[in-house]
Amino acid sequence: QVQVVESGGGVVQPGRSLRVSCAASGFTFSNYDMHWVRQAPGKGLEWVAVIWYDGTKKYYVDSVMGRFTISRDNSRNTVYLQMNSLRVDDTAMYYCARGAGRALDDWGQGTLVTVSS
Amino acid sequence: EIVLTQSPATLSLSPGERATLSCRARQGVGTYLAWYQQKPGQAPRLVIYDASNRATGIPARFSGSGSGTDFTLTISSLEPADFAVYYCQQRSDSPSITFGQGTRLEIK
């Protein structure tokens, strides 16, 4: 069955960097766009970034552009989110999700990133 | 950016009742509208895609309708497991995605 598992979250100081990962299994990873979506504590969902199935195109929400970089390794069935210059308002649960047409059909359980001094 | 507005913010109903949740887009999104269910401590789960198609494993009591700017998620007869937060989401003419702010469906 389809499985998506995030890892790499933790507590980091403002201005520092962190990389979170998402390991996928149960489907042909290289055929699917992959997304990151975040959710601040007690808040709604915010889309963060998408990477095309072949890694050729990447798009970001304005608030992370220039600070976050999405990438993937299709040989490892893994997608990454490199987060630089982290801010307190980046604190959130970060979910990885598989793109299916115009929706997101399978989600991981998330990895929590806390930015705090 | 296409803004999605969900209403009501909170809906209080009893099991067995019919639930009607609304999502309005500031500009037309065709039928590129999805709905997600999220329970406390869990990841979102896709319920409806392309406005009216049920995702895999979603019971028939869930239905979606609408096109353009006005969309509805209907749950015909509420089960205890249906009480959750529901989000709409669009991805129409750009690679980016936006979500509505959510509707909390709570037990009355």
Image (cartoon, rainbow, N blue to C red):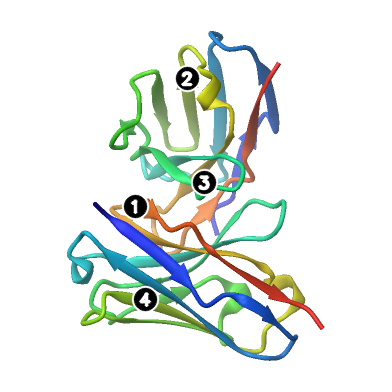
Mark 3 vs mark 1: in front: 1
Q: Which mark is residue B27?
A: 3
Q: Residue A64: give x, y in percent of width and height.
A: 59, 77
The Cα atoms of the two marked residues, 3 and 1, are separated by 17 Å
The residue depicted at 41 percent of the width and 54 percent of the height is: B91
Tag 4–tag 3 contact (CB < 8 Å) = no
Placement of B73 over or under A13, stated as above or below:
above
Same chain assignment for discs 2 and 4 = no
Mark 3 vs mark 2: in front: 2
The Cα atoms of the two marked residues, 4 and 3, are separated by 32 Å
Q: Residue furthest top?
A: B16
Q: What residue does disc 2 label? A: B75
The Cα atoms of the two marked residues, 3 and 2, are separated by 25 Å
Tag 4: amino acid: Val
The Cα atoms of the two marked residues, 1 and 4, are separated by 19 Å
The residue depicted at 47 percent of the width and 21 percent of the height is: B74
Q: What residue does disc 4 label? A: A79
Which mark is first along the chain, 2 or 3? 3
Same chain assignment for discs 2 and 1 = no
Tag 2–tag 1 contact (CB < 8 Å) = no
Please tell me which residue lies in front, A22 or A32. Answer: A22
The Cα atoms of the two marked residues, 2 and 1, are separated by 22 Å
Please tell me which residue lies in front, B28 or A96. Answer: A96
Tag 3–tag 1 contact (CB < 8 Å) = no
